[in-house]
Amino acid sequence: MAIALAATKGEALKLLETEGVTVVDLDYESGWQDAIELGRLGEKLGKRVQYRTHESIAVSSPAALVAALVAGLSRPKLTFRQRNLYCQFELTLLPAADLERLEGKAEKLGDYILAGHLTRDVDAVWTE
């Protein structure tokens, strides 16, 4: 299954016509307004259209969390989606002051740091 990200309605329309693309993922804030129309068009073409407001990311270690958030602040976020960062390690491994600082960085990006036991489905994994 080839999933393609569309940052605009125009891109989504082009991707629906693209051979090999089976799922068009609407990755723009107003995508919800286009989801039904594009979904119906996609059905006719045998393709699926999806719109999600968040991503679930499993973070493997404190080092991966620090690296990802520092890198995230130094460049533009590539998605409008809120990222839920599920830490697959004990949050108590981080000193309280460090955790607060990292939570502040995540918040600036519109993301949240959460305990790993809350994880449901995972869209991506961040490692060191």
Image (spheres, helix red, strand yellow):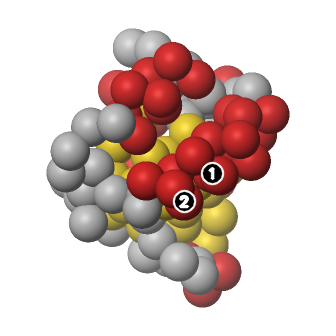
Helix or strand or loop: what does disc 1 sit on?
A: helix
The residue positioned 74% from the left and 47% from the top of the image is: 36
The residue positioned 56% from the left and 39% from the top of the image is: 26
Q: Is residue 50 left or right of residue 126?
A: right
Q: Amino acid at mark 1?
A: Gly
Residue 83, percent from left and from top: 59, 48
Q: Nearer the viewer, residue 13 or 53?
A: 13
Q: Which residue is mark 2?
A: 43
Looking at the image, which residue sits at the far top? 75
Q: Nearer the viewer, residue 13 or 111?
A: 13
Residue 118, percent from left and from top: 65, 80
- Tell us which disc is closer to us: 2 or 1: 2
Q: Amino acid at mark 2?
A: Glu
Query: What mark, if any, has residue 22 been given in the picture?
Result: none
Asked if the residues shown at circle 2 and circle 1 are in contact, with their CB atoms under 8 angstroms apart, the answer is yes
Q: Is residue 77 visible?
A: no
Figure check: 106 above or below 92? above
Helix or strand or loop: what does disc 2 sit on?
A: helix
Q: Is residue 6 left or right of residue 127?
A: right
Residue 27, percent from left and from top: 55, 35
Determine the CA span between mark 2 and mark 1: 6 Å
The residue positioned 45% from the left and 14% from the top of the image is: 76
Q: Is residue 44 left or right of residue 96?
A: left
Query: What mark, if any, has residue 39 been given in the picture?
Result: 1
Task: Categorize mark 2 by other alpha carbons within 10 Å: few (<14), some (14-19), many (20+).
Answer: few
Q: Quadrant of the N terminus?
A: bottom left
Q: Using the rendered view, name the quadrant where residue 103 is placed.
A: top right
Q: Nearer the viewer, residue 49 or 76?
A: 49
